[in-house]
Image (cartoon, coloured by chain):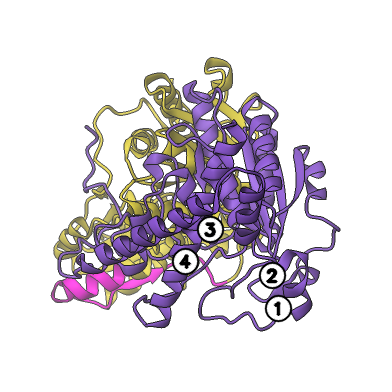
């Protein structure tokens, strides 16, 4: 028996529904249909009147969640695709994110964002929105890369009193498997060394952790030991773990699947440069998706996002500086 | 005295309080004592006060908008919340972190509005939805106000449609004051009366003369009763005219003279005063006494807020999250 990344998301929601009466699920096609990706399969039957289909109204879905949170509930909202959260942008960044600062009352909502690209999904079903939401004060943005994190970070997100954007990567849904959901887990706000090394640090998150590990495995044949840091949450950003890694390796490559202008990788490079300039033996580098909409055709898509090949190329340049 | 009489007296007193308070706010603004905007509900007191009076604080929820001083007062918002927020007192509900009409007390069922119009409609829906899940919805109602401009937003449409689908006991008041800032109805919507939209949403619809307290009270009570008794969302469109600029920075010179001289240009507070006296609901002496009492209350609230501390950037904790990281759930 093995557990996939999406199984973990489903099981976390099942546990939350079972253990906390304040939790309910609201989203499009998530009740009897079980969700576009089956992340809520069977939950409507198991928890009648706790799992609801809703109209195609992303703004109103988040508005409803905020109102329910004011009344003491812990809603989990499934956006069918992260891309569609742009319709809910106002309620997320202006209503939910400002509420605690303005009124002193935190808003414990969790918004699940099926994120990132898969072959053939095209410009509107492939986006990575984490950098946009991380820009706003008052939001927590988590980006689990492992089956265990998918499970435990969803549970912790719902327990947290503040609004959380839970960015789950669609590419990992069924591809990523684990023997079990590991009992031990790190808290949100702490990064993880996904692969230890000493010659360069790749700082990344979500599906790119796996691409970076593949790249590191390839460079191992040439004698390079690459460390991969999995940020786990992009906001808060665990700079301590990142700086400790850069202190070991002296070289930084920040990798992300989002668009290249600004964003998480830019933040990582800026902060390491500010606080760890003396640790660097080479100019810190970034590798992101290209500056176009996410293309439909698998051949274009594969060249749009960072891949083990492009990460290897970037690392070789960094190592030879 | 009949229940109607009590309702009218109560609604009228909230109108009077709002008017006297807002006249004071306008003076303070013009004297340079208020930083930022001042937004008044002049001309909308009858519909707003009726709505607030029909709701029960502690049970119902209410998301007021920019021109709802009367409704806030009737619902039970302390008058001092208004002066403290306008004057930036740290004792106020927003502690100087937000100002003017962007205030609320979510814990008492009155969320704080954001500037983005229509955005409170789904929030009230969510509060009611949560009450249903908790098993406390029976007999409750949730209300919010918007203007004619907000009816053009996606949030208004999404929120109202969602409330209708969920059959929530919600009352949405649309105060059609004929101008969204400077934009007239002719550039805002193309249907005859906005209430026609109610049919499209599958909800109850009422159209009312917003300058007439007797009519407003009667229609609001009926709509609230229907929602409370399980009739689903109700939309009330109140026809009136904004008797001030969009804010006190705006003289409203774009409002044509014939609108001001027309039926909806009449002052609902004056109309209500006559209605109360003529109907035997209150005497002139009583009204004068209320006026005097309110003026004193307003003076006190202004003086109190004035002498309180304003925020200190060195004492501000500058955090927008309640969680400390790394986060270990308790």
Q: Residues within 10 Å of mark 3 (few under 14, many from 20)?
A: some
Q: What secondary structure is marked by label 2? A: strand
Q: Nearer the viewer, residue B201 or A190?
A: B201
Q: Which residue is mark 2?
A: B179
- Tell me what residue is drawn at x 45 percent, y 74 percent: B26
Q: Which mark is residue A175?
A: none
Q: Which residue is mark 3?
A: A90
Is-magenta flag for residue B268?
no
From the image, state whether disc 4 or disc 1 is nearer to you: 4
From the image, state whether disc 2 or disc 4 is nearer to you: 4
> CB under 8 Å between callouts 3 and 2?
no
Q: What secondary structure is marked by label 1? A: loop
- Tell me what residue is drawn at x 56 percent, y 21 percent: A49
Asked whether, in this view, residue A13 is left or right of residue A194, the answer is right
Report, in whole angstroms, how far the alpha carbon at label 3 lies from the one at label 4: 30 Å
Report, in whole angstroms, how far the alpha carbon at label 4 lies from the one at label 1: 20 Å
Q: Nearer the viewer, residue B278 or A228?
A: B278
Q: Which residue is mark 4?
A: B22
Is there any visible trace of residue A214 in the rendered image? Answer: yes
| Discs 3 and 1 share one subunit | no
Report, in whole angstroms, how far the alpha carbon at label 3 lies from the one at label 2: 24 Å
- The chain that hosts pointer 3 is A
Is-magenta flag for residue A281?
yes
Report, in whole angstroms, how far the alpha carbon at label 2 lies from the one at label 4: 20 Å
- Residue A56 location in percent, x, y? 68, 44
Start and end of the magenta stretch?
A268-291
* Location of residue A179 with respect to A306 vertically, above or below: above
Q: Residues within 10 Å of mark 1 (few under 14, many from 20)?
A: some
Report, in whole angstroms, how far the alpha carbon at label 2 lies from the one at label 1: 8 Å
From the image, state whether disc 3 or disc 2 is nearer to you: 2
- Tell me what residue is drawn at x 26 percent, y 60 percent: A224
> CB under 8 Å between callouts 2 and 1?
yes
């Amino acid at each position: 028996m093995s557990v996939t990344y999406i199984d973990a998301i489903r099981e976390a929601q099942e546990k939350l529904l079972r253990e906390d009466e304040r939790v309910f699920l609201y989203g499009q096609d998530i009740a009897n249909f079980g969700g576009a990706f089956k992340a809520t399969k069977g939950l409507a039957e198991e928890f009648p009147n706790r799992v609801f289909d809703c109209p195609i109204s992303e703004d109103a879905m988040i508005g409803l969640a905020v109102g329910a949170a004011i009344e003491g509930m812990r809603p989990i909202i499934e956006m069918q695709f992260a891309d569609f959260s742009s319709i809910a942008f106002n309620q997320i960044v202006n209503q939910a994110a400002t509420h605690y600062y303005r009124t002193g009352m935190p808003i414990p909502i969790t918004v699940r964002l099926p994120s990132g690209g898969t072959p053939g999904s095209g410009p509107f079903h492939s986006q990575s929105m984490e950098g946009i939401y991380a820009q706003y004060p008052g939001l927590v943005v988590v980006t689990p890369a492992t089956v265990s994190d998918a499970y435990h970070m969803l549970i912790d997100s719902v327990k947290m009193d503040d609004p959380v954007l839970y960015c789950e990567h669609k590419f990992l849904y069924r591809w990523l498997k684990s023997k079990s959901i590991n009992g031990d887990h790190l808290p949100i706000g702490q990064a993880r060394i996904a692969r230890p090394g000493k010659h360069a640090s790749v700082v990344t998150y979500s599906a790119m952790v796996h691409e970076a590990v593949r790249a590191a495995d390839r460079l191992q044949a040439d004698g390079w030991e690459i460390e991969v840091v999995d940020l786990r949450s992009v906001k808060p950003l665990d700079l301590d773990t990142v700086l400790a890694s850069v202190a070991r390796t002296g070289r930084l490559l920040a990798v992300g699947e989002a668009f290249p202008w600004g964003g998480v990788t830019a933040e990582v490079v800026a902060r390491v440069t500010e606080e760890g300039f003396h640790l660097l033996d080479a100019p810190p580098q970034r590798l992101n998706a290209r500056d176009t909409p996410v293309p439909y055709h698998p051949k274009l898509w594969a060249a749009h996002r960072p891949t083990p090949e492009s990460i290897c190329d970037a690392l070789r340049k960094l190592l030879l500086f | 005295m009949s229940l109607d009489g009590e309702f009218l007296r109560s609604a009228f007193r909230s109108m009077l309080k709002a008017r006297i308070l807002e006249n004071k706010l306008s003076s303070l603004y013009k004297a340079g004592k208020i930083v930022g905007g001042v937004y008044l509900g002049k001309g909308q007191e009858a519909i707003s006060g009726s709505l607030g009076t029909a709701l029960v604080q502690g049970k119902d929820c209410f998301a007021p908008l920019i021109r709802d001083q009367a409704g806030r007062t009737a619902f039970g918002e302390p008058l001092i919340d208004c002066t403290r927020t306008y004057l930036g007192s740290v004792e106020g509900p927003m502690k100087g972190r937000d100002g003017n009409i962007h205030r609320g007390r979510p814990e008492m069922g009155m969320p704080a509005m954001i500037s983005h119009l229509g955005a409170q409609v789904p929030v009230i829906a969510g509060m009611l939805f949560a009450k249903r899940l908790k098993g406390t919805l029976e007999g409750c109602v949730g209300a919010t106000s918007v203007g004619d401009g907000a009816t053009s937003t996606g949030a208004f449409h999404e929120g109202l449609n969602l409330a209708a689908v969920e059959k929530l006991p919600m009352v949405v008041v649309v105060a059609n004051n004929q101008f969204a800032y400077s934009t007239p109805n002719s550039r805002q919507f193309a249907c005859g009366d906005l209430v026609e939209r109610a049919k499209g949403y599958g909800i109850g619809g009422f159209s009312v003369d917003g300058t007439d307290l007797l009519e407003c009270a009667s229609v609001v009570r009926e709509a609230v009763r229907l929602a409370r008794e399980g009739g689903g969302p109700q939309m009330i469109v109140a026809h009136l005219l904004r008797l001030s600029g969009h804010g006190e920075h705006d003289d409203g010179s774009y409002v044509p003279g014939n609108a001001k001289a027309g039926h909806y240009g009449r002052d609902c507070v004056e109309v209500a005063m006559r209605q109360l006296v003529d109907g035997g609901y209150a005497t002139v002496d009583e009204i004068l006494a209320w006026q005097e009492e309110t003026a004193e209350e307003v003076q006190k609230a202004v003086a109190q807020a004035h002498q309180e501390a304003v925020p200190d950037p060195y004492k501000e904790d500058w955090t927008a999250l309640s969680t400390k990281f790394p986060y270990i759930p308790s």
